[in-house]
Image: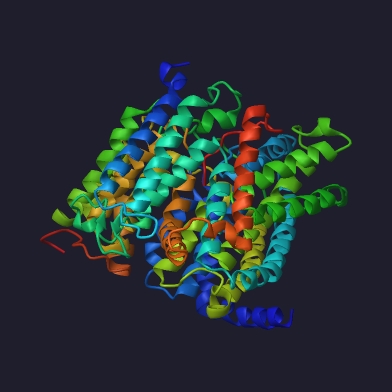
Amino acid sequence: MSRFQNNRDYYAGALMALIGAGAIVEGSSYGVGKLTAMGSGFFPVALGVGLVAMGGLMAVFRAPAPAGESGSHAQSLHAAGPPDWRGALAIALSVVLFIALAKMAGLFPAIFACVSVAALGTRATTLREAALLGLAVAVFGVLVFSLGLKVQFPILRGIL
Amino acid sequence: MDAGLVGLMHGFSIALDPHNLMWCFLGVLIGNMVGVLPGMGVLSTISILLPLTFAMKPVAALLMLSGIYYGAQYGGAICSILLNLPCHPPHAVTCLDGFPMTRQGRGGVALGITMLAAIIGAAFGIIQMIFMAPYIANIAFKFGPQEICALMLLGLLAGSTLAKGSPIKGVAMTLFGILLSLVGTDVNTGSERFTFGFLELSDGMELVAVSLGLFGIAEFLKSVNSLSPTVKAAKLSYRDLRPSGRDVRQALPAIFRGTFIGSLCSLIPGTGPTIASFIAYATEKKLSKTPERFGHGAIEGVASPEASTHSAVQGDFIPTMSLGIPGDAVMALLLGALMIHGIQPGPRLIVEQPDIFWGLIASFWIGNIMLVFLNVPMISVWVKLLSVPYRFLYPTALFFVCIGVFAARNEMFDVAATLAFGAFGYLLLQLGFEPAPILLGFVLGPRLEENFRRSVLLSRGSLETFIDRPISAFFVGLSVLLVVAQVYAALRKAKPPVRVPEAAFD
């Protein structure tokens, strides 16, 4: 078992405490007020305090390490394993490409890039398969969203 | 009763309107499909389609979105029984006896029994809703802001602690969800909160961006290379679905017990279909004279959890429609959809929007019947769908996520926010959080703050107002009881009765 798994609940608690602290700091700048006259910051600060408390509890009452509980098929399928960098990068890049290309180049290239780059995140998918999938979804997407639902993008900037 | 009958007749006139009928059919069809496809979730599907319903009438939108939810339950069973893949959490437990049945060549029978269980479970759930929802709403009519506040507290606590995972983490997720819902302009003072200078945030976070980030992109990040390649499922025709008389006799009592458990669970927020199915399975095993058959293809082990799932799915709508308090993330999303359409959820909904309430109930009857007719003759088509590999599925779904989020309000900023939520959601999953309660907090947050402010304003700053009023005190008492029970259970370190196979959240 990795060290990350062992200390998981500490990190989880720290993350929540951090978010809570942020809410307290930012929230108190909105004016907390009193119970009789609550300011905009009252609720955020209260939630922040709650989050910090939960973060503390998480670190104190650590759950037993979850890995190795049962080697069932279902377990191995869905437990969050170590991050898969290739897949993560492909997915992130695919969304970024969609954002960048949709307005600048048009819907067709945006969908093509989005789908085929995402498809390359899996090692089993070949370049050819990814391109074909991108092409198919792009044709479908343009038909449905541009021509059918009239989403406001050029299909291919400068041409359509 | 009379009013119920009149309402139901009215509902059928709404649901049978060709336009609404078409959307209902589309909803259950998509739901069924999504249920079958490994790796696709109900939550992400509803979120993707949500922006597309903005142009529709609210009734049609709700009928369709709900259809996805209960339609997916029909498809999910197919995936569990034939492939041993718990694609949908409520059906994870069905794998235990469903897959052994498939191995023995009785997969068709298991599916046939599932259909029977589904229709009995759903019918009971709907009848329960017809009787209980107006009754509960009638009581809730008298609620002031204090009662609403206390009830929300109870609902959120139950929703975050009774569901899967650590209760402490669940509460943290709920708090985080409420915090997210505060982003934007404060309606009481007009000042901006947590917008950090982004103009796009002054209207608040987009519901679709939050849910597609947490349940769409995060899910893709998790399963991109870890979902095993699909196995070929056995060929089935609808002839194989017919169970023998002996099978039915064996399954029927289990179906009724499961239905009962499901309907009970649906009334407690946070214990939706997933928990119902586990309790039903455990109960069935305990009651059985031959518990050793379980896990080796016992038909009761399929019948009971399936019946409980379907009755809980329908019953899930009761607190949502009668109180405006969703029990789980799917209901929170549907409630959010209603609010986007400008409909204020709460006890007045049944009276003020009879088209929606009774139309929805009537569409449940129609939708469930449609689903049986979709599944029995088309079973071979669904089985073929099972072999669509995930590696082609998720890139396509990713595009739908992008365009869906954009279409919600024509804002590219939201697509970027979705990616950020996806990354954050993946981090949360790695740290052992269950992100579902975030959506509960996010949808209920603004109403919680508003009602809390109103109650304290009415009581001139005294928090005692929450325990001075009997109904509100009752809810607060229940909340305290819930926390005490959780602490007690944690101290005793009680082991759950069945080992829960971790399944993807829906």
Residue positioned 55% across, 50% down in the render = B35
Q: Quadrant of residue B224?
A: top left
Residue B341 position in % (x across, y down): 41, 71
Of A67 and B299, which appears nearest the observer?
A67
Q: Residue at x 44, y 76 (%)?
A: B57
Q: Is residue B240 above or below residue B359?
A: above
Residue B98, image x, y percentages? 70, 40
Quadrant location, the N terminus of chain B: bottom right
Residue B88 appears in the picture as rendered: yes
Question: Is residue A116 toward the left or the right of residue B130 in the image?
Answer: left
Residue B479: x and y, percent? 60, 49
Q: How is the image coloured?
A: rainbow
Q: How many labels were placed on the picture? A: 0
Residue lying at the far left in this picture: please name it: A158
Residue B438 locus on image (x, y percent): 44, 47
Q: Nearer the viewer, residue B217 or B339?
A: B339
| Whether residue B291 is situated above or below residue B242 in the rendered picture | above
Task: Give the residue at x 65% y 33%.
Answer: B489
Decide if residue A126 is in sight here: no
